[in-house]
Image: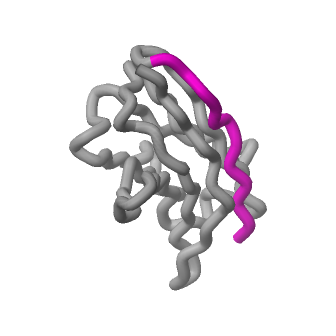
Amino acid sequence: VQLQASGGGLVQAGGSLRLSCAASRSILSINHMLWYRQAPGKQRELVARISGGEFPASTNYGDSVKGRFTISRDNFKNMVYLQMNSLKPEDSAVYYCNAEAYGSNYWGKGTQVTVSS
């Protein structure tokens, strides 16, 4: 599974961004799609997860983003999105798209999100 993340950028605190992840295969065949992030000097952190083939989709969020971030999927376009609202400087990180499928983990290249105070 190839993944391509996009949508990162520079935003002021309190602002919003939407990240996109394009998958090379049907999301319906993927167990879970996830967003992780990693800030300099910190461990990679799970941000959000959404099921692939379930209807309705089940979602999970890291404690630090609950109520501010929303993960969603478009099965027809094989896309997963991360809507990020009320952004804080501590949300600054490289965000990675990940897929759990076929007994393996697949990673895309990250997209940088920088939130200025």
Q: Is residue 21 above or below residue 109?
A: above
Give yes or no for residue 4 being in the magenta stretch: yes
Q: Residue at x 61, y 58 (%)?
A: 28
For the C terminus, which image quadrant? top left
Q: Position of residue 51 (x, y in %)?
A: 45, 55
Q: Is residue 8 above or below residue 97?
A: above
Numbered disc total: 0
The one of 108 and 102 positioned closer to us in this rendering: 108
For the N terminus, which image quadrant? bottom right
Q: Horizontally, is 54 left or right of 3 in the view? A: left
Q: Position of residue 59 (x, y in %)?
A: 36, 46
Q: Quadrant of residue 38?
A: bottom left
Q: Horizontally, is 82 left or right of 48 in the view? A: right
Q: Which residues are magenta?
A: 1-12
Give yes or no for residue 109 being in the magenta stretch: no
Q: Position of residue 2 (x, y in %)?
A: 74, 66
- The residue at the far left in this view is 63
Q: Is residue 64 above or below residue 24?
A: above
